[in-house]
């Protein structure tokens, strides 16, 4: 933990954060760590972080599987009672302390293991997330041709079981089958897009333990992905804040282009109706509510540490309450909008094949790299639509990847805390990018997709729920809800609305616990298509999940052993109370109960003894909504 700043820095009222009186040039509020250049950059970065691949390849599938339009009802209920409150909590937590996911735990040092758990989770996700981006890069480059390579069954990698809907028109020697039979799995039909994915791109091995060779084209694309991430982050939020103007907004342009093209196709209405038609009887199914809560929780990026990190670069009085509502609603609206784009195209494909939409619908990599690419081959100028689709996936992935890497770098730099590492933050970023690339190399082997799905299913599943639940409980019940509400009032100029106070204390922890129970009850052994993972691989998956959770009790025991006190109760009390340097990072914001005592800071004593003492003066706090709030320094 970094040493507390010198007392003279806390007490110097003449120069605020090193600014020269009368200076006209706009400077960062926090010169040492830096701030977002403007609030738009923070909002766009947070939108790019929250809106990821899951919005495109998981939500539409969950929606149609869980009652179509009826799924929207529990989805938005969970957004209001769990998603937005947790989002606001993490933003306010990071912004108040101006620290990353480790430094914020000065609030209760015994729970710093929660921050380490967040770092472990972000490391796992960052490793495999960039591999997904590299696969999107590979398809993006492969689409730059006159005919998409997964259109016909006439390629060297195709098998006799391959049957494409366009092969007859191309003069292929494939056996004549009617369109319904083309998707009948009893005939062992495989599509050209599936064989391109399994036999050419991945050269998929038969077992997770059989790594085979490294796929050099994928390795090259992985290198490109990490180089782009580093170049966008080498100056921290100053460089990534400029990039997000494009990476966070252009996916919406692509979604709109694909949506306009999709709804003009024959069968698009059928696909959209299949996506939205409510099945109200499913409202009473606990599984539907569990899926809704899980999707809200995971899609917003709670407990990854990224929200705390991004908010730590805000100015102290920024209205993060407003930002949390805007970003959360944007994320969920994007998921719904992406469903229209996906199912309009899948409806067209189902109409073309003469089958039900459910037979072409898929989720995860199966949607992004098999089902949707196959549907694109049926469109005129198919390479254009393919390029747009995979470019959108690349941008969605990069927006999340930026924040994952910045979370790790910020945590390390804040933890060391000295000027030497702050000046060399770029090299820390480079080192993390190189390590991330090397750890991602096994995922580019012939068994790489097995490992990728294993990490996706276990590394960031129930562990996130446990981390978030402990964070919520420690802030509300260990640090104290009244203390935290006063902190927010000092920062924003108004206390959190009563609804959020109730959610933080009761509703959100209860919903998080429900998600955990639901995750355990619904657990099924992982499988990829017909391949069932061996026991040893599943055990590795559980170890990855536990590795982040175990950080919490292990660090708690360590902190308890080092705490002052003669009895266990005294040690526990000292280990959980806020450290002396907890509070706003800058001297000018340390008002109220965080103000330095006059006995220590002799330079703030009034020169005129007849004037009121400094600690008796109500200090105005300027909120980002423009209202001045009087904060009594004796709180």
Image (cartoon, rainbow, N blue to C red):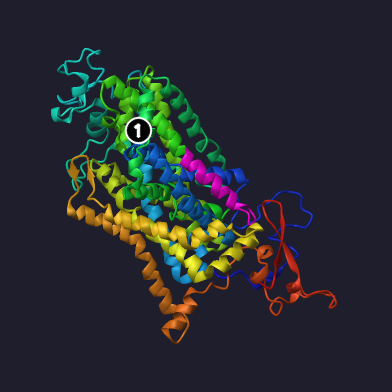
Q: Which residue has dot 1 on it?
A: 138
The answer, for residue 184, to whether it is visible in the render is yes
Q: Position of residue 503 (x, y in %)?
A: 49, 58
Q: Which residues are magenta?
A: 314-333
Q: Position of residue 333 (x, y in %)?
A: 48, 39
The quarter of the displayed image where residue 571 is located: bottom left
**Drawn side of residue 109 relative to residue 488, left or right:** left
Residue at horizontal 30 percent and vertical 32 percent from the top:
361
**Drawn side of residue 9 relative to residue 541, left or right:** right
The answer, for residue 141, to whether it is visible in the render is no
Task: Decide: few, some or many residues near mark 1? Use Cα within 10 Å; few <14, some 14-19, many ≥20.
Answer: some
**Location of residue 558 with respect to 87 vertically, above or below:** below
In the image, 324 versus 246, the foreground residue is: 324
Q: Residue furthest bottom?
A: 566
Total number of numbered labels?
1
Q: Position of residue 325 (x, y in %)?
A: 55, 47
Residue at horizontal 64 percent and vertical 70 percent from the top:
594
Residue 159 belongs to the span the image colors magenta: no
Q: Position of residue 605 (x, y in %)?
A: 77, 75
Q: Which of the image's four quarters has the C terminus?
A: bottom right
Residue at horizontal 74 percent and vertical 77 percent from the top:
602
Report the magenta stretch's main SS: helix
**Location of residue 275 with respect to 515 vertically, above or below:** above
Residue at horizontal 39 percent and vertical 47 percent from the top:
292
């Amino acid at each position: 933990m970094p040493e507390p700043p010198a007392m003279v820095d806390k007490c110097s009222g003449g120069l605020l954060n090193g600014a020269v009186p009368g200076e006209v040039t706009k400077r960062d509020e926090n010169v040492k760590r830096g701030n977002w250049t403007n609030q738009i950059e923070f909002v766009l970065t947070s939108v790019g972080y929250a809106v990821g691949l899951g919005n495109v390849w998981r939500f539409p599938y969950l929606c149609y599987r869980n009652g179509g339009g009826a799924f929207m009802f529990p989805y938005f209920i969970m957004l209001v009672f769990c998603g937005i409150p947790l989002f606001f909590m993490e933003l306010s937590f990071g912004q108040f302390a101006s620290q990353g996911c480790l430094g914020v735990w000065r609030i209760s040092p015994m729970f710093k293991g929660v921050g380490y758990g967040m770092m472990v989770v972000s490391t796992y996700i960052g490793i495999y997330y960039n591999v997904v981006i590299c696969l999107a890069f590979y398809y993006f480059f492969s689409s730059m041709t006159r005919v998409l390579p997964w259109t016909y069954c006439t390629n060297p990698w195709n098998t006799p079981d391959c049957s494409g809907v366009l092969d007859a028109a191309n003069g292929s020697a494939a056996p004549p089958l009617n369109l319904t039979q083309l998707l009948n799995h009893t005939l062992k039909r495989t599509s050209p897009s599936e064989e391109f994915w399994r036999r050419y791109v991945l050269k998929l091995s038969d077992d997770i333990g059989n790594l085979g060779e490294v796929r050099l084209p994928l390795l090259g694309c992985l290198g490109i992905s990490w180089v782009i991430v580093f170049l966008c982050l080498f100056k921290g939020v100053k460089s990534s804040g400029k990039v997000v103007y494009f990476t966070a907004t252009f996916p919406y342009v692509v979604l709109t282009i694909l949506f306009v093209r999709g709804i003009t196709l024959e069968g698009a209405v059928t696909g959209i109706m299949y996506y939205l038609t409510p099945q109200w009887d499913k409202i009473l199914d606990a599984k539907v509510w569990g899926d809704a809560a899980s999707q809200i929780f995971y899609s917003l990026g709670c407990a990854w540490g990224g929200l705390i990190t991004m908010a730590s670069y805000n100015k102290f009085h920024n209205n993060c309450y407003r930002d949390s509502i805007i970003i959360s609603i944007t994320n969920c609206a994007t998921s719904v909008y992406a469903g229209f784009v996906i199912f309009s195209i899948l409806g067209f494909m189902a109409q073309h094949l003469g089958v039900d939409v459910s037979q072409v619908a898929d989720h995860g990599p199966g949607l992004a790299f098999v089902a949707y690419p196959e549907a694109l081959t049926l469109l005129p100028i198919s390479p254009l639509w393919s390029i747009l689709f995979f470019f959108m996936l690349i941008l969605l992935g990069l927006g999340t990847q930026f924040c994952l890497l910045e979370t790790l770098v910020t945590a390390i730099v804040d933890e060391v805390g000295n000027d030497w590492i702050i000046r060399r933050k770029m090299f820390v970023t480079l080192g993390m990018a190189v390590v991330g690339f090397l750890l991602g190399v096994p995922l580019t082997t012939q068994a790489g997709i097995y490992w990728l799905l294993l990490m996706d299913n276990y590394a960031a599943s129930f562990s996130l729920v446990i981390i978030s639940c402990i964070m919520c409980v420690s802030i509300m019940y260990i640090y104290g809800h009244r203390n935290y509400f006063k902190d927010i009032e000092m920062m924003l100029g108004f206390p959190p609305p009563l609804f959020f106070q109730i959610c933080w204390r009761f509703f959100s922890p209860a919903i998080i616990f429900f998600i955990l129970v639901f995750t355990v009850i619904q657990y099924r052994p992982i499988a990829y298509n017909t391949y069932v993972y061996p026991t040893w691989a599943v055990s590795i998956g559980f170890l990855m999940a536990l590795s982040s959770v175990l950080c919490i009790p292990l660090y708690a025991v360590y902190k308890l052993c080092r705490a002052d006190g003669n009895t266990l109760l005294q040690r526990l009390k000292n280990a959980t109370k806020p450290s002396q340097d907890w509070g706003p990072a800058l001297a000018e914001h340390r008002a109220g109960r965080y103000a330095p005592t006059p006995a220590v800071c002799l330079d703030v004593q009034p020169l005129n003894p007849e004037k009121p003492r400094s600690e008796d003066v109500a200090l105005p706090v300027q909120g980002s909504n423009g209202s001045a709030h009087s904060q009594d320094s004796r709180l």
